C-alpha cells in the first residue's frame, strides 16, 4: 500500500470562491508531483477546472513549475491570473 | 521582509514616496496614481476589494524596483499598492519615478506599471450597482526564468 502525504492548499483570489473554501488539506500518494496534485484537485473540485490551467503555484513560499515532486506537509498556494494595478 | 513598504491596507500617501526618492540630479518627476473608477465594461462599479498574496506580492514589487534600478542606476523609483476595501476615487497603486530627463521617467513609470499588472499576485474583486460582484479576469503569472525550482 502506498504511503500518503498531505499537502496544505491555500486558494487566492477567484480560486477560493470556485473551490468553495479558503484552505484545504489534500492527501495524495507519496511521489505525487505538483502537476499530479492539480489533476486530483480538478477532479475533486470541478468548478476549478477552467481556471487551474491558468493558475501559477507557490510551493512553501516560492513560485515553482508543475514538474516539482511534493513532500508531506508542503504548503501550496494557488495563484490565479492576476489583476492588480 | 517589510511587506508594508510595498503593500498596505491603509490609504496610499504620495508624500513619503516623494521624500524617499528626492534626488537633485533628477530633473523629471513622474507620478502615476491608479484610482478606482465607476465603470467596468459598461457596468456601474460601486467599490472594489483587492486581495494579495502578501509576501509574494511585496517580493514581486520589490523585484520590479530592483530590476528597474539595475537597468537605470541613475534614477529613483518607488511602487506601492493598496489592498483591502477601496471606495470610488481611492488610490489603488502609486508609481513614483525620478530621472534626469522626462522621456526616461515616463517610459520607466509606464513599464513599471505594466510589470505590476502582469507580475504581482494581487486580485481585483469588483462590486457592481446592478449585478453580482465578481473577480476580474487577469494575466496568468509565469515562474521567473531562474526561479528557485528543482
Image: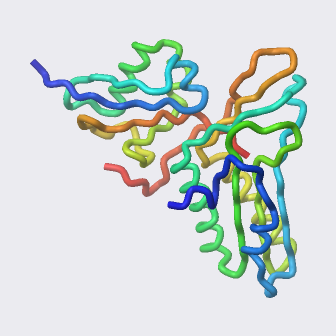
Q: Can you name the residue that lies furthest to the bottom here?
A: B25
From this view, report whether residue B80 is shown above or below residue B42. below
Choose top left, top right, bottom left or bottom right for residue B77: bottom right
Horizontal side of residue B130 vs A29, given as left or right: right
Choose top left, top right, bottom left or bottom right for residue A83: top right
Q: Can you name the residue that lies furthest to the left here?
A: A1
Pick the front one: A48 or A17:
A17
From this view, report whether residue A18 is shown above or below residue B122. above
From this view, report whether residue B131 is shown above or below residue A5. above
Residue at position x 82%, y 22% from top?
A: B128
Instruction: Where is residue B21? Give x, y as percent.
Output: 74, 75
Residue at position x 77%, y 50% from top?
A: B11
Pick the front one: B51 or A68:
B51
Horizontal side of residue B150 vs B32, given as left or right: left
How many discs appear?
0
Instruction: Where is residue B5? Give x, y as percent.
Output: 63, 61
Instruction: Where is residue A79? Give x, y as percent.
Output: 53, 36
Residue at position x 55%, y 18% from top?
A: A18
Q: Can you name the residue that lies furthest to the front here?
A: B10
Choose top left, top right, bottom left or bottom right for residue A4: top left
What scheme was used to colour the molecule? rainbow
Pick the front one: A5 or B99:
A5
Residue at position x 60%, y 35% from top?
A: A81
Instruction: Where is residue A8? Give x, y as percent.
Output: 36, 31
Horizontal side of residue A15 vs A77, given as left or right: right
Amino acid at each position: 500500500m502506498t504511503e500518503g502525504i498531505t499537502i496544505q492548499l491555500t486558494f487566492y483570489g477567484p480560486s477560493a470562491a470556485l473551490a468553495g473554501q479558503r484552505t484545504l488539506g489534500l492527501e495524495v500518494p507519496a511521489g505525487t508531483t505538483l502537476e499530479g496534485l492539480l489533476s486530483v484537485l480538478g477532479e475533486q473540485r470541478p468548478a476549478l477546472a477552467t481556471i487551474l490551467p491558468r493558475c501559477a503555484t507557490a510551493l512553501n513560499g516560492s513560485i515553482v513549475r508543475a514538474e516539482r515532486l511534493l513532500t508531506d506537509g508542503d504548503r501550496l498556494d494557488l495563484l490565479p491570473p492576476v489583476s492588480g494595478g | 521582509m517589510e511587506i508594508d513598504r510595498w503593500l498596505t491596507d491603509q490609504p496610499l500617501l504620495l508624500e513619503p514616496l516623494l521624500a524617499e526618492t528626492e534626488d537633485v540630479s533628477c530633473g523629471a518627476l513622474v507620478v502615476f496614481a491608479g484610482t478606482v473608477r465607476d465603470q467596468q465594461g459598461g457596468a456601474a462599479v460601486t467599490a472594489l476589494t483587492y486581495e494579495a498574496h502578501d509576501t509574494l506580492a511585496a517580493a514581486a514589487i520589490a523585484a520590479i524596483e530592483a530590476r528597474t534600478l539595475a537597468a537605470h542606476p541613475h534614477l529613483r523609483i518607488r511602487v506601492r499598492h493598496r489592498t483591502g476595501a477601496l471606495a470610488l476615487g481611492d488610490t489603488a497603486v502609486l508609481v513614483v519615478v525620478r530621472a534626469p530627463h522626462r522621456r526616461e521617467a515616463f517610459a520607466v513609470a509606464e513599464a513599471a506599471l505594466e510589470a505590476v499588472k502582469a507580475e504581482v499576485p494581487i486580485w481585483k474583486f469588483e462590486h457592481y450597482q446592478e449585478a453580482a460582484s465578481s473577480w476580474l479576469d487577469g494575466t496568468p503569472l509565469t515562474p521567473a526564468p531562474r526561479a528557485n525550482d528543482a
